[in-house]
Image (cartoon, rainbow, N blue to C red):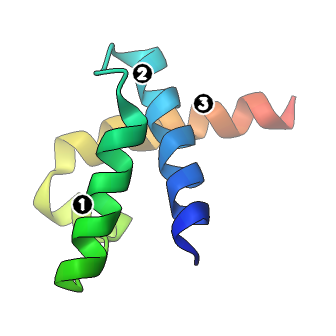
Amino acid sequence: MTCLESFLILKDWLTKCNASRKLNDNFDYRIKYSLNTAIRKQRLQMKFDTLKAKNPALHAKLSILMSKNDKDVIK
């Protein structure tokens, strides 16, 4: 996946999260900074299953939000 594709996916995801709970609107800078740091340090992103093990509460909230978004797309 290219850096641009990653950026667009993360921005879309954060925009959806922002609809649920107000976040800092400066997404572009934070996403670019995080992607560049991950590339520089050669660290891969966390898988959704890993999030379930490390933070079950957040995983549950995101699962609910993602299932609601999936249902909205199907309509």
- Residue 51 is labelled as 1
In this figure, which residue is indicated by the disc labeled 2? 18
Q: CA distance from mark 1 to mark 3?
A: 19 Å
Q: Position of residue 23 (x, y in %)?
A: 30, 20
Q: Secondary structure at mark 3?
A: helix
The residue drawn where x is 27% and y is 57% is 34
Count of all numbered marks drawn on residues in the image? 3
Horizontally, residue 4 falls left or right of residue 63, namely right
The residue drawn where x is 17% and y is 65% is 53
In this figure, which residue is indicated by the disc labeled 3? 68
Q: Secondary structure at mark 2?
A: helix
What type is the residue that disc 2 sits on?
A: Asn
What type is the residue that disc 3 sits on?
A: Lys
Q: Nearer the viewer, mark 2 or mark 1?
A: 2
Q: Position of residue 18 (x, y in %)?
A: 42, 21
Mark closest to the chain's N terminus, 2 or 3: 2
What type is the residue that disc 1 sits on?
A: Leu
Q: Secondary structure at mark 1?
A: helix
Vertical side of 41 occupied by 49: above or below: above
Mark closest to the chain's N terminus, 1 or 3: 1
Camera-side residue of 39 and 23: 39
Quadrant in which the C terminus appears: top right
Horizontally, residue 70 falls left or right of residue 2, namely right
Which residue is most to the left? 54
Camera-side residue of 17 and 57: 17
Residue neighbourhood size for the residue with mark 2, other residues' Cα within 10 Å, grouped as few (<14), some (14–19), many (≥20): few
Dividing the picture into quarters, in which one does residue 47 lie?
A: bottom left
Mark closest to the chain's N terminus, 2 or 1: 2
Q: Nearer the viewer, mark 2 or mark 3?
A: 2
Q: CA distance from mark 2 to mark 3?
A: 15 Å
Dividing the picture into quarters, in which one does residue 21 lie?
A: top left
